[in-house]
Image (cartoon, helix red, strand yellow):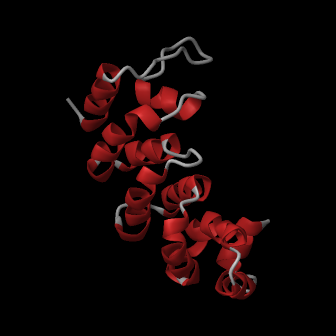
Amino acid sequence: MDLANQLNKELTKAGAPTEPSSFGTVLTQLETLVNRPVSAQPYIDILLTYLPNADNRTKEFIAIALTEKGLSPASKALLEMFKHDPTLEEPQRWVVGKALYTIDDPELYPEILAICKERKYQSSRGMLIHMLAKIKTEEAFNILIVSLDDPTVLLDLY
């Protein structure tokens, strides 16, 4: 059994729902967390357990499922994946950034500021650049001003 199937099996045991899709098929538990207004809060420990070892598609789905305001217990794992997972491609890293933006964990603001300065993350840091408005410090303002001349960020700000 592959990792995604194991994850869905554990989510089933934990009571995660499955719902029909618009096309008449039944969504998996993870797909339901991604595509329906179902909170990932009760399943956060399971999702975080599978996150590091999942294939990139499953990592992306887990990140989308964890894209929920106030889900701070997930923020550190997502940040570590954003910074250190060499298998992530830029669009997947952007999805992780969107999750971090939505969760909005103030404890991570110093690390978010550091990432926003790093051109190596290119446009995948776009959602984190949006967080600068939430951080509201002089440093955040200065990073935002410098980012205005960075074409990899400008593409995302429009």
**Left-right relation of 12 to 157:** left
Taking the spot 66% from the left edge, 85% from the top edge, the residue there is: 143
Figure check: 99 above or below 153: above
Determine the residue located farthest toward the left in the rendered image. 1
| Quadrant in which residue 82 is drawn | bottom left
Determine the residue located farthest toward the top in the rendered image. 24
Taking the spot 57% from the left edge, 84% from the top edge, the residue there is: 117
Tell me where residue 8 appears, x and y as whole percent. Answer: 33, 27
Q: Residue 17 versus residue 24: which sits nearer the camera?
A: 17
Tell me where residue 26 appears, x and y as whole percent. Answer: 48, 15
**Left-right relation of 8 to 149:** left
Tell me where residue 17 appears, x and y as whole percent. Answer: 45, 19
Count of marks, rendered view = 0
Q: Residue 33 versus residue 95: which sits nearer the camera?
A: 33
Taking the spot 41% from the left edge, 23% from the top edge, the residue there is: 16
Task: Pick the quarter of the image with the C terminus.
Answer: bottom right
Tell me where residue 96 appears, x and y as whole percent. Answer: 50, 56
Figure check: 131 above or below 60: below
Figure check: 100 above or below 37: below
Taking the spot 69% from the left edge, 82% from the top edge, the residue there is: 147
Task: Pick the quarter of the image with the N terminus.
Answer: top left
